[in-house]
Image: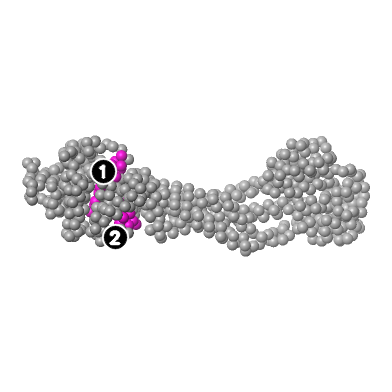
Amino acid sequence: MFELSVAMKHIRVKKRQTILAVGAVGLAVAITIVSRSLMNGSMESFFSIFFELAPHILVTPKEGEEYIYLYKTLMETIWAIPGVIAVSPTLATTATLAYEDNVDNVALQGVISVELNKVTKLGDEYMVAGDLYAIQNGRRVVLGQKIVDKLDVKLGENVRATFPDAKPLTLVVVGIFDTGVAEWDESVFVSLDTARDFMDEGDVISSINIHLEDPYQADAVASEISALGYEAKSWRTMFPDFQEAIDIETFSNNLILILVMVIATFGIANAMNMLVLEKTKEIGMLMAMGANRSSIRRIFLFESGILGLMGGIFGCALGYLVSVYLHSQEYTVTAPTAPQPIVIQFLVDPWDLLAFTLIALVLSVAAGVYPAHNASQLDPVVALRG
Amino acid sequence: MSNIIEIKNLRKIYEDGVEVVALDGMDLIIEEGEFLAIVGPSGSGKSTLLNMIGLLDTPTSGEIWLKEKNITKIDPKERARLRNRELGFVFQYHHLLPEFSAVENVMMPLLIAGVDKKEARERSITFLEEMGLGDRLGNRPTQLSGGQNQRVAVARALANHPSIVIGDELTGNLDSKSSDMVYDLLRELNREMNQTFILVTHDMKMAEKTDRILRLVDGRIVCEMLREGDGFVTRDLCELEEDHT
């Protein structure tokens, strides 16, 4: 394979040109890797923040039924599905809460606080006073911040819950949470037993929230549960705009990155063009020595391919190191809805390293096609004259 | 002796705005093992003829036979293969690949022919040693003198044991000492290996060291001289015009 040794020789001897071409591609790949790692990291943060309050899957009663009756069996079935990491049953109703002269209508939800916290992080991340877990012990309630504001109630005081057809209850305020999301901050949580007492219902629930290890498995798991006759919706079905926004963002970002790489490979095309011009006589001599047109073409394709591959590998290494460094710096941003600053993550997907090395290789070979073709079409007599 | 090259009514016309007749119906037979010089003024068609024999260019009409095979219209791939196996080229400028060392340059036609790298290296080293360049194997063209480079180029042309070695003003850039050295080398190889040498030259002194001199004017052979002992005899087709050289 003399073509390869000629190509390698050019690369080794023409150091400046090699450094420039490899540098341009490498930089583009590095930018791509860092940008993608930021994208992955942001997506990860976004997902985890988003799903701190939203379930991956919401299961509601069978068609025509008011409640999920055999919920313990159903929950066991759900737990048996691989990838399920949290299952939280809820019995929800509407209630009127009263404190002194203040009255407010709220969404009252009976939950198991440990399970709720696994699905929503409510107990860990959003409590501003008291304790979510305290609702498990008797007639106790945690309130959203908005309700606290309306009722003007404090921790440890009693509120009264009433509703037509419901059994009035007096509840002790044991916790206050603030999520920044209006829908949530207008809810109150009690234990499942308290909710059943209030509603005067048996051992039933109205919905189940599920969290999965991989949110992208939601559709598959949801359809598995739907097969049992229950209504199961994945987050994709519940929030269709969310996925669309992610897709558009990802697409436009990837498009820009590919364009950056295409521009960088112009550097290789340029270097190859210069090389063909500079090497005209030598190409003529190689032809005189018996190198045929496809051999000449191969020399320059190999060369651009190798430069691209070197650029890809260099860029991946650089991009990876920069990403790891930036990740270690734990830069933060604050968002109005987030109770704590969000740490910016840079997560390198190993597949990206492989994919963008290959993309750099393919684009570089493509960049070499035209100069290589020109070289192969030289007339040896004219080429030897120079 | 068998005919290694047979040229029949060969014409080459360049049409680049004006029509230029470079070869005007030439007939020529070259026998195996000949040591031949082609002389003539600039533009007489010497290099064109050489390019035809060297399979670098194609004629407008006429035929070229190499070893009793018509090669006038063979496809480019076969042409390249024949250049590699049957022909060796040495040009006025050595045209060595500047990034490669002397031995790597000599190896190149062997590698193109698909010879194993190790064997190619060994054979190339032998050639360079014969050329008196055994201590210059790893030097690049920029690290060698003009004469040394031209000897590397000769070694490269001979590396694949071609049947025909073509030299286009191969000593044109050398001083007389280097030029004699290269000439003696070729002569020796011609006698030892029975290789055919076709040399285009401006230099009559060089031409007179060969066995047969063809003089071209306006794309035709106007004079042919054959060695007889230390001198030359002209054939009857010789039209002795004034020299434009």
Q: Label 1 belongs to which residue?
A: B86
Residue pictured at 70% horizontal, 54% vertical: A49
Query: Where is residue B13, by image quadrant?
Result: top left
**How far from the left and from the top, in percent, is residue A337?**
72, 57
The residue lying toward the viewer, choosing from A107 and A287, is A287
Can residue A128 be seen by looking at this rendering? yes
Which numbered marker is on residue A270? none
Q: Quadrant of the N terminus of chain B?
A: top left
The three-letter amino acid code for the residue at tag 2 is Arg
The residue lying toward the viewer, choosing from A151 and B215, is B215
**How far from the left and from the top, in percent, is residue B33?**
18, 44
Horizontal relation, residue B96 to residue A35: left or right: left
Q: Chain of mark 2?
A: B
Residue pictured at 30% horizontal, 45% vertical: A290
The three-letter amino acid code for the residue at tag 1 is Glu
Q: Label 2 belongs to which residue?
A: B136
Element on which disc 1 rests: helix
Q: Which residues are magenta?
A: B78-107
The residue lying toward the viewer, choosing from B201 and A179, is B201
